[in-house]
Image: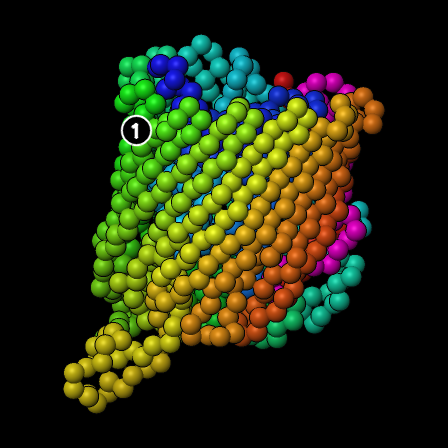
Amino acid sequence: MPRNSIALALLLAAPAAVQSAPASPPAAASPRPFELGTITVSGTRQPGIDISGSSLSAEAILAFERLTLDEALKLVPGATASNSGGSRNERLIFVRGFDRLQVPLSIDGIRVYLPADNRLDFGRFVTGDIAEVQVAKGHVSVLDGPGAMGGAVNLVTRTPGDRLDLEGRAGLSLDRRGDLSGHDLFGYAGTRLGRWHAQVSGARNDRDFFTLAKGFTPTPNQAAGRRDFSDARDWRVNARIGFAPIEGGEIAVSYTRQEGSKNAPLETTFPLPVQRFWAWPEWNVETIALFAALPLGDSARLRAQAYRSRFDNLLRAFDSRSQTTQTLPRAFNSWYEDEAVGGFVRFDADLAPHHALGLALHVREDEHVEYQQVFPSRVIEPPQTSRETTWSAAGEWRFAVSPVLFLAVGGSFDWRDLHRAEDYGTPPGGGPARVFAYPTANGQAWNAQGKLDWRPDPASRVALAVSSRARFPTLFERFSSRFGGATSNPDLGAERATQVELSGAREAARWRAEGALFVADVRDAIFSVPALFYPCTASTVPPPVPTLGCEPQPVSQSRNVGRGSYWGAEGALSAELTSRLRTGASLTFVKRDIADPNNPAWRPTGVPDISAFLWAEWEPLPALFLLPSLELAGDRWLVNTAGNRWIRDGSHALLNLRLAWRPRPGLEVAAAANNLADANYQLAFGFPEQGRNVRLSVRAVY
């Protein structure tokens, strides 16, 4: 490949951040990311525990004791985590105000998607084998696939770099009273011999409970001390074997399986008789994938991926708080059995000096199967199947306007074919309960983006990006009856966000800074609105002639009726003050001006207007490292369980402290105290968070 083409590709692939100041010695070399599992993000990898706006290293995840994905993402400027509240007990993430439906999650570039409702629980994803977390915000390359309306998150697993890579970790969690509340384990073994490499890893997080802050006021639903029903179990294994048949080419096969189980704490103030008593004994994801990269001469490259994924989920609803009986009509067992088959082909080429072209085609077919056991009859419904195929064809042109000015423009067309959507119950037109099929409708959407990147010198960068991306609705949004209170809308269209971002970065000898201003215009946002359902027409369309027995029934229906804007700013600064002292800080401001046109009281929940993270790493003595950090968040909108009252709450300041001893390279013994001041706070109405807790850990690397 010509030198000028190589330089151009590097500048366009990684424009948003610059190299950080030298990091203090870690316990071991940072894990090497699996390159075929990466996506395109605007930034470079930061060494050590440094944090940028586009990536998070394994060393940072370990140093700040982030065992699950939701906790890890809170370190990234522009991202925040929350709690769903209610009976689902799901940990959420937001990127610049956009939620889990609008920000796709991938593992090694393979999307984790639940076709029924895509209600991912980010607390189920352990971080033990993650080499890097990539976060794309605003401008998400169309070459990486559909759905990235608000951003994208990709977990890149590690790959071996030497003849023998070994690592083991173990940790114990203690509550504020010193009682053992959980433990975690991680093991990794990998080898790279000539053109071959192979690896296997396993991670496990077990939590028996967490303890509330001392300032929590007991209620009839929740006593002081241990949080009821806060137990969870998660484990994950990952295996991969790869071969490089020619220089610059690689083929790899990977297998990943994670299994989880969790309980759901009760809302602390809502009357107990009307609460739900839910638990998930199964929350399992399994993927087998083939990755391939092949150079085509000196100026082109072909990359491909194929995969099969499964998601198996069991939700159990009980009669009462004791979770011991299922005899009343409110009890049920609900199974999801999902399968996805898909992949992509991507072609990149240097067409001429200073010009490059990228083309990609993505396809994925999702099959969702669900069925339920009802009580007291104990009858199990027949399986109901929905099947859908999503396509995306994308292109991107990259070229140098001048030696210091670069432009990338891209576009894609996404389309969705819904083959079947089944449900069980009384059909919309009436009759006995049975499996029936909804009317189906397909969908399509376009996406376009452009980015102008100015690099006046190797240490500076300013970029202006514009991107308009769409997101197709889930099966739940189109067809769920919401326990009989809603009617379907097969023609529900895609949401859209058009984002503009001005960003920049600057590096000096001992410091690095970056920041961004952003605004997003959100259109066709999906809200549930009041509607009238006419049984005789099985729709919201009234009969041409009034018919006896066809009186309208009040229901709700999902429609594209919302419009608003998200805007804000974010920035990060890190500096090496002395050879033994490094520090960093990040700040995020997000404002969401969007409303439900049918509910004046509605407010967007889960995201604080302002948040910050500050840290320092100090080596007071050789091999001894002290890492204090402070996590700050302002109020956010919360809604009560009944869904009729919104309040401002959730502000908090969490002081954390970690002490690590590294007696020799490859060995670390550490103790960390989180929420050191025992702050009492909540991220969802009636769901208090964990109080002071301690983690003891050991890590050995060979």
Image check: 342 left or right of 206?
A: left
In-front residue for pair 222/452: 452
Q: Which of 451 and 306 is in front in this view?
A: 451
Q: Residue at x 37, y 40 (%)?
A: 450
Quadrant of the image for the C terminus? top right
Residue 113 shows in this picture: no
- Position of residue 232 in the picture relative to residue 596 (left or right): right
x, y percent for residue 23: 67, 25
Q: Identify whether 388 is placed above or below 188.
A: below
Query: Is residue 683 highlighted in magenta?
Result: yes
Q: How crowded is mark 1: few (under 14 residues within 10 Å), some or many (20 or more)?
A: some
Picture coordinates of residue 366, whole percent (x, y) = 31, 47
In front of the other: 574 or 88: 574
Furthest toward the top, the residue is 194
Q: Which x, y percent locates residue 165?
A: 57, 18
Specify the segment rendered in magenta: 660-685
Residue sitting at 28 percent across and 51 percent down? 445
The residue furthest right is 621
Residue 434 visible, this angle = yes
Return the x and y of residue 566 as percentages of the image width and height.
49, 56
Residue visible at 62% across and 39% down in the picture: 572
* Quarter of the view holding residue 182: top right
Report which quarter residue 212 is drawn in.
Answer: bottom right
> Mark 1 belongs to which amino acid?
Leu
Quarter of the figure that contains the N terminus: top left
Q: Name the residue under label 1.
A: 357
Instruction: State whether residue 94 is above or below residue 426.
Output: above
Q: Is residue 137 magenta?
A: no
Image-quadrant location for residue 364: top left
Question: For the point 42% across and 23% down, which residue is it?
Answer: 403
